[in-house]
Amino acid sequence: MAGSVVAVDVRMAAALAQGVGDVAEFCRAQGISRQSYYKWKKRFETEGLEGLRDRSRRPKTVPGATPAEVEDAIVRARKELADAGEFNGPFSIAARLEAEGICPVPSRATIARILSRRGQVRPQPRKRPRSSYRRFQASRPNEMWQSDWTQWQLGDGRPVAIAGTLDDHARLLVGIGAGSGDGTSELVWSVMAEAIGAYGVPMSSLTDNGLCYTTARRPGHKPAAFQANLAALGCQSIASTPYEPSRDVWRLHSLEG
């Protein structure tokens, strides 16, 4: 049953059952318009008390809704991409649908909403909202580069590390590389060295305090290779709190997450 009969509708039902003499006075007393009165009167005459119950305002049809078969194709593409060890986020799913000849392909935002509604996205209740971050940006290119690495897993279960370096002014990804296992000094420096070869030496470098990058927060330890190599090139190394640079560097990679 759609809904319950509210008090004003009960009073109207009683009034309609015995007839209303002065419609204008009745509408003022009930706080309704004449249009509403005649609408309820018509419903009461044709359906009785059931006609006064609340009705859903949901439209019977939604012309812009994504067809069910397209939603099924989105879910299927996500699973197939995951099984193949490939990125299975909205970007990759959209490309997969286009290759399959589905037209028009839903927007990436629509694909993300469908995945969430169909239970294909793992909720992250402890993830900070983007609005809680305070954005900072260097004033010119090569003033500061940010570096970080993240863990990934191949389709066969093998772990890999993806390291990247980002220019903090233009948000240009100046270097990226991958290696098996965790992020190592060799991997992160190879990415930085390649970026320096392409874009020059930055004035400063920002990383978290991971040992592959710096020992600045570990008194008594000799400088990490990444830190020492940058110092030799005249680049200042800055160590932030753990994971801080990742919100900019890995924002680029999370588009496929």
Image (spheres, rainbow, N blue to C red):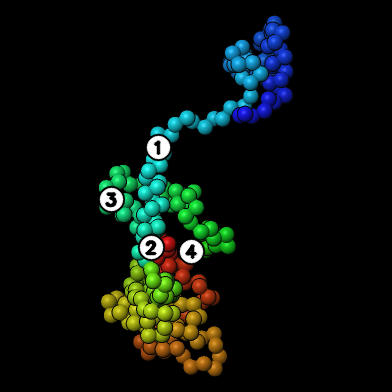
Residue assigned mark 4: 135
Q: Decide: marks 3, 2 in contact (CB < 8 A)?
A: no
Q: Earlier in the sequence, mark 4 or mark 2?
A: 2
Camera sees residue 128: no
Mark 4 neighbour class, 10 Å CA radius: few under 14, some 14 to 19, many 20 or more: few
Q: Quadrant of residue 173?
A: bottom left
Residue assigned mark 1: 64
C-alpha separation, residue under disc 3 versus residue under disc 2: 18 Å
Q: Report the mark closest to the observer, 1 or 2.
A: 2
Circle 2: residue type: Asp
Q: Quadrant of residue 152?
A: bottom left
Q: Secondary structure at mark 2?
A: helix
Q: Report the mark closest to the observer, 3 or 1.
A: 3
Instruction: Please name whichever residue, 73 or 51, is drawn nearer the observer in this view of the structure.
Output: 73
Q: Report the mark closest to the observer, 4 or 2.
A: 2
C-alpha separation, residue under disc 3 versus residue under disc 1: 21 Å
Q: Earlier in the sequence, mark 1 or mark 2?
A: 1
Residue assigned mark 3: 100
C-alpha separation, residue under disc 4 versus residue under disc 2: 36 Å
Q: Secondary structure at mark 1?
A: loop
Circle 4: residue type: Arg
Q: Decide: marks 3, 1 in contact (CB < 8 A)?
A: no
Instruction: Please name whichever residue, 30 or 171, is drawn nearer the observer in this view of the structure.
Output: 30
Q: Report the mark closest to the observer, 3 or 2.
A: 2
Q: Decide: marks 1, 2 in contact (CB < 8 A)?
A: no
Q: Residue sitting at 59 percent across and 13 percent down?
A: 46
Mark 3 neighbour class, 10 Å CA radius: few under 14, some 14 to 19, many 20 or more: few
Residue assigned mark 2: 83
Q: Decide: marks 4, 3 in contact (CB < 8 A)?
A: no
Q: Earlier in the sequence, mark 1 or mark 4?
A: 1
Q: Residue sitting at 54 percent across and 75 percent down?
A: 241
Q: Quadrant of residue 27?
A: top right
